[in-house]
Image (cartoon, rainbow, N blue to C red):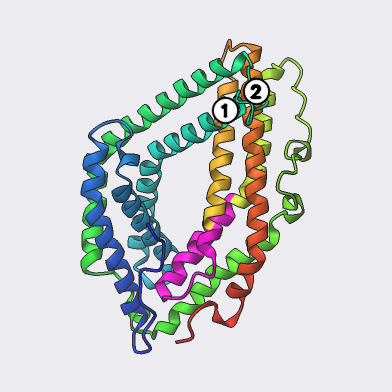
Amino acid sequence: MTDAPTTAPVARAATAGEVLAGYLTAQAGAFLRALPQAVGEAGSRPAALPASAQAAADLLRAVRRIGGALHTFAAAFEAQWARESRTELRWLLDLLDQEPGCQRRATRLLEALDSLADTSPEGAGMLAGHAGAPKARALLERQLTLARSRAHTALLQELRSARLHALADRMTLLAGEVPLVAPAAAEPAAALLPATGTALAALLGAGERLPWQRAARAYGGAGLHRLGPVREAAPGAVPAARAPADADAALAADDAPWLRARVLVKRARYALEVCGAPGGGLAELDGVLARHQEASDAAATVAAAARTPRITPATAYVLGVVHADQRLEVESARYAFGRRWPGVVPGLAGPAAVPSD
């Protein structure tokens, strides 16, 4: 489905309240239309939510956009209501994405391992014929299936909870009346532009602080070398228990600026949607950073699997290769982001970034 703006361009006579109310009531309506189908299909069988792609996509799309508008234009809403609504929307977003996230990681990792273990003459991988490949695949499949089942169980419990019903009631009220602060609602639509500009400035600032020199090549292969040595264990400690945690923390810190950039890309996109302005390539940037996040999450999953007790050295080796493959995908996504970023920046920083009326 498309992520094109869902609002018409801001009319000259519209007030800020009318623009925000029109956007949020439309998104709340989309939320309420998608919720019954997503809830019903998620309760039918494991992994049903990813299968009901349209309902799940519509619901998640509405949740993200309502939350983004409430964040960027917070001053226009009743403070407690906006804060509580954002908290509940974030809860639902995290809940709904757990099971599909497990499915995406399973697909990504198993396809990567199968490609690396390919034995065909025209596409043989570096793990072709390796004794640890079948066991590594079985381990990943087993652990990811278990994680998906647990996520599905948690989803079923929460989809029938009073908390979700309360959120649905909140969205029902939002579809009829948006709790705006009276002075902000009466201002002209141009009053929305400073908040939109703030969202764009936050993205541009984050972009300037990204370590671009480390994303200069599609596959630098230097990810582990630049993270610094793993600290030695303290006297009496067990080194094997410390090293993985330190390495995981170093990789998480390395990924953090890019993950933060994706959050800011989304907020800027949704702010421009509210104003009916073009996204300036932000949807494409969001897609690239989504690939970065998927590869980062997949690598972390493989690292956790490699710490499974009593696996054979051959299995551990294969998992290490898959982990390295995903970290190279992380670097590839950063490179792609860097290639696209210069073309997007002029549109965000220039006078046409937001409408003038």
Is residue 180 in sight in this rendering?
A: no
Is residue 270 rendered magenta in the image?
A: yes
Q: Please state the horizontal and vertical placement of residue 231, each as a whole percent of the image.
A: 76, 29
Q: Are marks 2 and 1 in contact (CB under 8 Å)?
A: yes
* Residue type, mark 2 in image: Leu
Q: Which mark is residue 127?
A: 2
Q: Nearer the viewer, residue 136 or 18?
A: 136
Question: Is residue 133 something one can see in this rendering?
Answer: yes
Q: Where does label 1 land, which residue? A: 113
Comparing 5 with 114, the one in front is 114
Residue 232, labelled with which disc?
Answer: none
Q: Is residue 181 above or below residue 170?
A: below
Q: Is residue 314 magenta?
A: no
- Secondary structure predominantly adopted by residues drawn in magenta: helix
Name the side, left or right, on which 314 lies relative to 263. right
For the point 23% across and 56% down, the residue is 32
